[in-house]
Amino acid sequence: MATTFNLHRFANPARFMRLTDVVLPWLSAAAVASLAIGLVMAFRAPPDYQQGETVRIMFIHVPAAMMGMMCYACMAVASAAALIWRHPLADVAAQAAAPLGAGFTLLCLVTGSLWGAPMWGTWWVWDARLTSVLILFFLYLGYIALANAFDDPERGARAAAILSLVGVINLPIIHFSVNWWNTLHQPASIVRMGGPTIDPSILHPLLIMALAFQFIFLALWILRTRTALVRAKIDTLRQRAAAASGVDRG
Amino acid sequence: MGGYAAYVWPAYGLAVVILGGLALASILSARAARRELQRLQQEQPRGRG
Amino acid sequence: MTRKRRRLYMVVVGMVCLAVATGLVLNAFNQDLVFFYSPSEVAKKPPVAGRMIRIGGLVEMGSVKRVGGGPGIVFKVTDGKFDLNVAYTGVLPDLFREGQGVVAEGALDQSGALVASQILAKHDEKYMPPEVVAALKKSGQWRENEAASANAAAALPGGKSL
């Protein structure tokens, strides 16, 4: 039980605020620095021998896809913690992550389209990879809508948390779709048996950009969670003021 | 851009719009919430803690 | 603690049930999720002439020919065992090349050739600068058939490399 105890210590909102007061400036600096380095490397990278300059779209497309899935995994873990342990911070964190994940997934879909148009000869096909990523985008939208659909925010949070857990099944489907079925999308280049199939001159910018996207996500996730906690405190203060003055603000 | 500028630049432009938009919205909303909390805490100092 | 434990078990059991159900559904839909068929599959189970299908494979080396000086082309799609004639008139994707992966959508005519209405290029998961390819070729480490087999693996059912 020591682990749950520690988890709760971290999940304590006041402690979270104090911890992230220190961490957030460093994370933001890391995000800006790695993004700057990554962008310089992305435009210095050589063109691909087959795909030419369009390979530069990969430096946005692949990190966005990674973060779209990573963010969903974070959201689902937080939702599970909220459902099982009913910790107030877990729901707040899960809901703070959803718009970020939707943004990354949309970026992945559109940049993929911009890449597919000249290389594949089509903006969109209904193959298993593209379709499962589109489903991921709609899962985010459904989650956001459901969390805000109820008058009672707690019921909304619970319904949304269940949806996010159901949607977790989509993550392995996205990753393995290119192996399980015939797809137009090519198989994985980085996370695969036998190591990456990308030349270092193209792989390194890609990895730095992936790191930058990771920092951006973490910094924004923490910032949004903090804002939601501050807003919860504002609500409590307002209710207390209303109770003290005997006025029902409804 | 080897004839592919029409595809490469929009991809980077969209990244700026989406990630910049998310960052800006998150920062502005954080700032607004912090100001509101400070105002409330000044109005009712006993409401702290 | 027991209520928390109970909720934990409910979530775990729910996730397991969901995974099993999804697995069964995906297994049942397996054939319908296939984006294209290989020439071997067409040879084994020829589809009805006139029905829209997609064929995927490699553009066979040296098979691309212009038809009578017009805009139309014919080429062969191969998966190493069987090949299939394809006829197409229209815009080709920039990555359409001999030895590269391709997906052709269209219907078979009476002779068993595919009359394509759309051609999509399928690329493999390798990325490298042209200088590296040139250096590999110069040092004799570049094997065209290796590159081609990687392409074929990417284009073939399951897309499994190695």
Image (tube, rainbow, N blue to C red):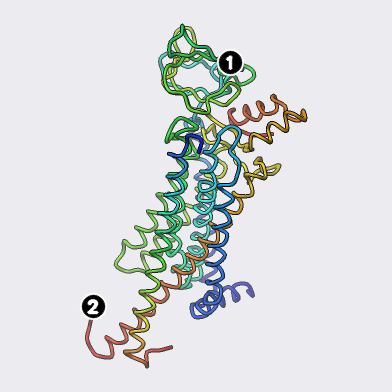
What residue is pinned by disc 1? C83
Residue A142 in the image: x percent, y percent? Answer: 37, 54
Q: Is residue A124 left or right of residue C3?
A: left
Q: Amino acid at mark 2?
A: Gly
Confirm whether circles 1 and 2 share one chain.
no
Q: Secondary structure at mark 1?
A: strand
Image position of A17 with respect to C12: above or below:
below
Say which quadrant the N terminus of chain A sits in: bottom right
Left/right placement of residue A161 relative to residue C152 reads left
Q: CA distance from mark 1 to mark 2?
A: 74 Å
Q: Amino acid at mark 1?
A: Asp
For the point 64% across and 17% down, the residue is: C81
Looking at the image, residue A151 lies above or below residue C154: below
Q: Position of residue A239 (x, y in %)?
A: 31, 83
Q: Position of residue C85 (x, y in %)?
A: 52, 13
Residue, x 48% and y 72% (percent of image)? A87
Residue at the far bottom: name it. Answer: B46
